[in-house]
Image (cartoon, rainbow, N blue to C red):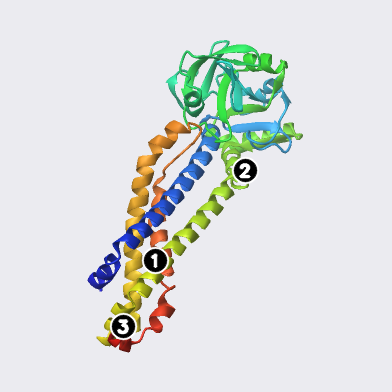
Amino acid sequence: MIPVARRLLFRNRGGLIVTIAGVAATISLLLFLFAVHDGVRDGSTRYVSTAGVDIWVSQKNSDNILKSSSFLPADLAFEVAEVDGVAVASPLTRVITKADVNGRRSSTLFILAFDPETNLGAPTTVSDGSAKLERGEIVLDRSFVKKYRLGVGSMLEIQGRAFTVKGISEGTNALVSQFGFTRRDDAAAILGLENTASFILVTVREPDERSKVAERIRVQFPDLSVHEADDFVRYHHEEMQSGVLPVFAAAAIFGAFVCALIVALMLYNTVLSRREDYATLKALGASQRWLVRVIVTQALIVTALGCAGGAAIVAAMTPLLLYTVPALSLRYEPQLLFVLPVALLVGAVSALAPVGLLKRIYPGEVFRA
């Protein structure tokens, strides 16, 4: 059956190449969308999941650093530190701003300013330079650095204040904005507010006591929101799932539909253009079920070749995309392999399109002049 399917398929090489190219383009688009999806999710949550914070304390009804506002007195950290079981309580200030880079206004920066005395809240994913900051120093996300051609030692201005790039962090790109990290005293100068924090970060003495310590803080400060680390990370995932990520999911579903349509049209055209061949097969005793299996085999061959082509396109285009669009955050997880069986399933289902046409082909057609 496979040799027959292959021979019928390869008789129209031009149409086959066009179809495989269309499937490959669709598969590469799907892989790209899922890679952006995973990159945005990782860039939006890696900081909070790796910051080494046990408990996040914020203003009431604030549960993430991305889209919710929180304003607290920084001195509140001293009161939280007095709660039984708390090892360290330190303020973290969030500043949403833009920078001036060589006279050019940058895209939005999410600056997280930590207390240099405790270093709690400092980035832990710095790959170049250091997160040990002096006054006037900043850590920037790698995508931001590449976009504006910066590096360790480069200068930029934020609200008229000069900063030197001290380090470059990874996994801190939320696509629509990138994270930066400074000292709290520098953030206070940018804001013009000395005693303002966005969050109080807490570490506990005994990790097993984290839930109990969180409950003690809730009891003592009933007007605040108190989040354990796992819950805080989950809130960020939920925020992204309710925001930009569904757009990528919808685009991926649409891409799967386009892939199915391309394969279905190719198969229908193949049966239509090779009507006499299928009539000959019927005259030789081929059953309808056997012919359907031939069509499904053709669909699987085309889809498999398209998947291979799509993977090759992604491998070739990814370095170019990251170079030309530094703000992109692409993350290719092993889970992306599920695209292959799903694509094959979609291809097999699309083989149902020409089944009706097969039924209308009669063995006697082989004797037509």
Residue 228 vs 181, above or below: the answer is below
Q: Which residue is mark 2?
A: 239
Circle nearer the viewer, 2 or 1: 1
Furthest-left residue in this view: 3
* Callouts 2 and 1 close, C-beta under 8 Å: no
Which tag, 3 or 2, sits closer to the chain's start? 2
Instruction: Give how far apart the Cα atoms at labels 3 and 2 are.
Output: 57 Å
Q: Which residue is mark 3?
A: 279
Q: What is the x, y in percent for residue 364? A: 31, 89
Q: On the picture, is 146 further left or further right than 281? A: right
Q: Which residue is mark 1?
A: 266
Instruction: Give how far apart the Cα atoms at labels 1 and 3 are.
Output: 19 Å
Q: Amino acid at mark 2?
A: Glu
Q: Which residue is rendered at x = 39% and y = 68% of the image?
A: 348
Instruction: Give how far apart the Cα atoms at labels 2 and 1 are.
Output: 41 Å
Instruction: Decide: few, some or many residues near mark 3? Use Cα within 10 Å; few <14, some 14-19, many ≥20.
Output: many
Residue 125 vs 356, above or below: the answer is above
Which tag, 2 or 1, sits closer to the chain's start? 2
Q: Which residue is rendered at x = 71% and y = 30% of the image?
A: 70
Q: Amino acid at mark 1?
A: Met
Circle nearer the viewer, 3 or 2: 3
* Callouts 3 and 2 close, C-beta under 8 Å: no
Q: What is the x, y in percent for residue 333? A: 41, 44
Q: Amino acid at mark 3?
A: Ala
Question: Is disc 1 placed on a helix, strand or loop?
Answer: helix
Instruction: Decide: few, some or many residues near mark 2? Use Cα within 10 Å; few <14, some 14-19, many ≥20.
Output: some
Q: On the picture, is 262 further left or further right than 60? A: left
Question: Is disc 3 placed on a helix, strand or loop?
Answer: helix
Q: Which residue is rendered at x = 43% and y = 79% of the image?
A: 356
Q: Which residue is rendered at x = 41% and y = 74% of the image?
A: 354
Question: Is disc 2 placed on a helix, strand or loop?
Answer: helix
Which tag, 1 or 3, sits closer to the chain's start? 1
